[in-house]
Amino acid sequence: MTALRTLLCVVSATSALAFPLDALSQVAAPGTSSFSFANGWQTTGRSSLGLNIGASRTGGGCGTTALICDIPERTARLYANTMIGNHWGVEVGYLDMGRIAAAGGETRAQGLNLSLVGKAPVWQSLGVFGKVGTTYGRTETSIVAPGAAYGSDQGFGLSYGAGVSFAFTPRLSATLEWESTDFRFAGGTRDPVRSTSLGLRYRY
């Protein structure tokens, strides 16, 4: 977890250096065509579609379901991204966190997300990105422990994340991403659900 928080800090610092890096990329010798993130964001489409598959865990207390919390749940996220500059963009997506242990029960969590995304090149086809936004989530909790709250709840929550991206071609890239999303659970509790995922993104 400490490493992931450090990655988020690196993303913020790298974004601050994005402008000089972009300026340097324009000084390439005439006739060169080597692909990099700095050039790739300008020579390919500014919009992209992506799919991530990974595993999620709840970040809150699990109470009597602590053993269940030790079992990660598969998660999926489908998203669309549009750049509004060389290094900033907007992303919308649907996420399904699977069935997680929360609020003393087993919970199905899913939602719609809107985020501001910042990207920066690191080296050739390697880049980093970070994002912050909000998710309108809905949860359905089934009772698995005596006295535990169950039922559904919904509402907005904070979401943020960071990751790295590697471009195989100017249009297709692989991503490794960590995310945290706040969900409302039965009984009025609010806890973060955190996930780590691998994905593919297609730029058009």
Image (cartoon, rainbow, N blue to C red):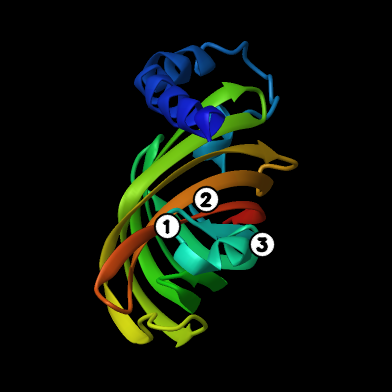
Residue 10 drawn above or below residue 174:
above
| Residue at x-position 52% and y-position 11% | 27
> In this figure, which residue is indicated by the disc labeled 2?
45
Q: Position of residue 89 (x, y in %)?
A: 37, 47
Image quadrant holding the C terminus, namely bottom right
Q: Are marks 1 and 3 in contact (CB under 8 Å)?
A: no
C-alpha separation, residue under disc 2 versus residue under disc 1: 43 Å
Nearer-N-terminus badge (3/2): 2
Give the mark nearest the N terminus, 1 or 3. 1
In the rendered structure, which amino acid carries the disc numbered 2? Gly
- Tag 1: amino acid: Gly
- Kindly state the secondary structure of the residue where label 3 is placed: loop
Which residue lies at the image location 55% right of the left edge and 28% below the top edge? 3
Mark seen at residue 71:
3
Q: Which mark is residue 61?
A: 1
Determine the image quadrant of residue 110: bottom left
| Disc nearest the viewer among 1 and 3 | 1
Few, some or many residues within 10 Å of mark 3 (<14, 14–19, 20+): few
- Residue toward you, 142 or 140: 142
Residue 76 image position (x, y, % from top left): 60, 67
Q: Residues within 10 Å of mark 1 (few under 14, many from 20)?
A: some
Q: Residue 31, can we see it?
A: yes
Amino acid type indicated by mark 3? Ile
In the image, residue 115 above or below residue 14: below
Compute the Cα span from label 3 to label 2: 39 Å
Give the farthest residue toward the front: 146
